[in-house]
Amino acid sequence: MHLTGFDRFVWAATFCGHLVLLFVLFVRGRAHSFPAFTAYIAEKIATTIVLYLVLRHFAFATYRSCYWSLYIVDEILQLLVFYELAAKVFCPTGTWGRDVRATFLGLVGASALVSLLLTWLAYPAAPLEIQTFILRSNFFSAALMSQLFVGMVVLSSTAGLPWKNHAARIAQGLGAYSIVCVAKDIIINYVGLSQHARLYNQMSHLRILTYLGCEVFWIVMLWLEAPAPRDLPKSTRMQIYKLHKQVEYDLTRIRTWRGN
Amino acid sequence: MRSLFFVVLAAMLLVVLVSVLLRHYLRARRAEQLTWEDLLKRLTWVDRDNIAMIAMDVITESGEPRTEDSSFALEPSAIWTLLGGLEGLEALEQNCHVLVELAAYVQKWYPEALVVAEQLRLNAREIEWHVGRLKGAAKTGNLQSSFADYAQRAAVIYYLMTRHVLSLYEQAHLPGLADLHQAI
């Protein structure tokens, strides 16, 4: 497998970026709030090391097996990160808001369905069957993640659920990256690899540069503290809790009226 | 042909995702700059006496359900008139959107009041749901059958919730009480 100087540079930069990001997550205490995201970044570091060693010391077939096994782990962790962020937005009090549960499940189902349909339609021309499979699976993953993140933004905005600062920043990075991946994968799946290997390389560079940008964004944003909450006067706090009790009582009665 | 279908549909998906994301991002940025007072100014005037009249048909002054035979006496047509028709319903819906935003504001800046803010948000969403059903029924011509189920319930929840919010404002001496009183 031939790697250019640029390939080596971005590989090293991404690896260093992950190390710095992991350092920030632990030193600034974010790892506790975002365990899935921390695991995702740690997995990226481990993947890079493992694949590098396997490529140097083992046959290409072994490298391919490792690559696919780790790819599946990566996909599962991405979904866990999505769930972690969704839980932070849609479970502000520890339980899922009853107005968003069904819509959220619908969002996941619809995103998976649309991604599957589009992936079925895609059939990129490539010298090897395995390359076609890789291109299609990359597209499926990017399409699914981008829809999930955009859907989550829309749902939270409609339901009036605010994003906490760091969760919003992680989602912005992942959302922007997955959208760039979708754009790249649409082009690659359309033109194929057979006669456009150069275009594939350029698109891959665009993807990796976007990811590097996201890494820098996460490092800066997760290093900074979230805006401090404002002080709520004690008397107001008591009144607000009283209001909560009253409204809850009223609603319990109203829901038992005729029609229910 | 299959590739063409793929590229057209996938490009459409991409355009939709980017435009939806941009729209919501810009909306969120605007919302971040809003103050509590800005949100209150967005409340639409509704005839509170009429809402109270609809509510009093089924609950007492103290908020308890009426047990006597005279409860649920208002006909759907009277409720429709008192609410101000579809325009009145839309004003209620608009105010619920603002109440949802007020709850989001409290959740964001006063995390200690998270539980009650979430409850207020859910209440406002419940009214939105009732009003949404009514608007849907109006569009499909089924308003008559749906009205009694949804309109009075929405009006009563709205009435009680706004009364509690006003009471909270009065007791806690929060700013903007006069504006809020006029609006909701």
Image (cartoon, rainbow, N blue to C red):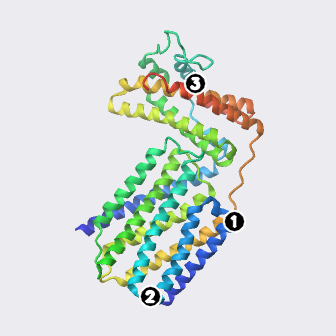
Q: Taking B66 as reference, is B108 left or right? A: right
**In this rendering, the label closer to the viewer, 2 or 1:** 2
Which residue position is annotated with label 1? A28
Which residue corresponds to mark 3?
B48
Q: Is residue A96 above or below residue B93?
A: below
Task: Name the image quarter holding residue A9.
Answer: bottom right
Q: Quadrant of residue B166?
A: top right
Q: Position of residue A14 (x, y in %)?
A: 55, 78
Q: Amino acid at mark 2?
A: Phe
Examine the rendered structure and indicate whether residue B4 appears above or below residue B160: below
Secondary structure beneath dot 2 equals loop
Side (left or right) of B171 relative to A116: right
Q: Which residue is mark 2?
A: A58
Badge 2 sits on which subunit? A
Both labels 1 and 3 in a single chain = no
Question: Which one is nearer the viewer's eye here, A188 or B97?
Answer: A188
Residue under mark 3: which chain is it in? B
Q: Is residue B135 visible?
A: yes
Q: Residue furthest right?
A: A234
Marks 2 and 1 on same chain = yes
How many C-alpha atoms fall within 10 Å of the one at disc 1: few (<14), some, or many (≥20)? some
